[in-house]
Amino acid sequence: MEQQTKNLINRAVETLAQITGIKVVHQTNAPKAGNVYPDGLVRIDYKDMHWDFAIQAKAKVTRATVAMEKTQPTLPGQDRILVTEYATPPMADLMRTIGLFFMDTAGNAYINKPPLYVFIKGNKRPENLKPAPTKRLFKPAGLKVVFALLTNPQMVEWPYRQIADRTAVALGTVDWIFRDLKEMGFLLEMGNRRRKITNPLTLLKRWVEAYPEQLRPKLGLARFKADDPDWWKDIDITGYNACWGGEVAAAKLTKLLKPAEVIIYAPEPPGKLIIEQKLRKTTAGDIEILKPFWTFDHEFDAIGIAPPILVYADLMATGDDRNIETAKIIYDTYFAQPDRQDR
């Protein structure tokens, strides 16, 4: 375990113990099994009872982080707890709502194991705590290239110039992105210009966590509202040089979700569609137009659906329980296959 992670956990454990008076102990020699890799265990003693919680440490939490941690596997009979530097009040509420236990270094926490119940929010971020810097690989340019590589694995062996042209990223930027991929354990170079993405599922997870914070805010074009909530059902979106993302795309892929929000990826707001469907422009609209950041073809182009990785990320970014369940189905269907496993 990295010393930075160990320090984070110890600070959170010590603060929770001080605030609540409950005995809380960090056990670093946690068992590992299958694809469950906890960062140690937290043992809590209360009223002659005790509980062990598998730790997942995260310096920063977002809605996507919370959503993905909710779906992570645990050992039989073992609960999971997310340990982070700081959870804002809205994030604390979200984690309680979806039943994800957590603690942070400010003493905010949620644990519900009757008769033990802890919910603390609103403690301020420690003054000496600086937000963890975002690695270059997970800033906008890096996210564009990683998205292309995850969607088209064969692209990893292309010449850098060809990758730069396809992703609209500077050639020099592609060079340091590949160096970062190698340094972080996501790229294997095998000689004769042969390369391979390693740990693709971990890389996917990191991409999904970073996308809503780093890249998505730069894509927004406009928001609209429709009188009929089902207006999208009979629309062939490909006729408008656009594709579906988010909940509508997920509904079409799984047949299980009733969309409440609509995401459309298009180079510009599709005027013909707006007029035909009488969509009204408003900042509070539940129809969002986002600009595509990819230029390559993919298997769902013909039916007007964004790449599944992006649909999955859109769902996870909401932090909504029903979307999390649908996102897990998409993950299991399109990503959790033997040839995509981390190795």
Image (spheres, helix red, strand yellow):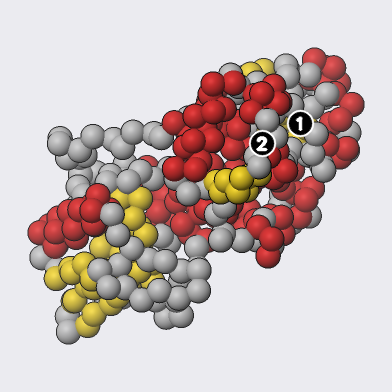
Q: Quadrant of residue 246?
A: top right
Residue 319 drawn above or below residue 266: below
Relative image position of residue 125 (x, y in whole percent): 21, 39
> What residue do we see at 15% from left, 55% from top?
15
Q: Amino acid at mark 1?
A: Phe
- From the image, tell me which residue sits under label 2: 148
Any part of residue 68 in sight: yes
Residue topped by disc 1: 296
Say which quadrant the C terminus sits in.
bottom right
The picture quadrant where one finds residue 25 is bottom left
For residue 116, say whether it is visible.
no
Q: Is residue 85 left or right of residue 48?
A: right
Estimate the x, y position of residue 111 in percent, counting from the top left: 31, 64
Towards the viewer: 217 or 224:
217
- Residue 290, image x, y percentages: 65, 25
Report if the CB atoms under discs 1 and 2 are less than 8 Å apart: yes
Query: For this rendering, which residue is in front, 24 or 20?
Result: 24
> Which residue type carries mark 2?
Ala
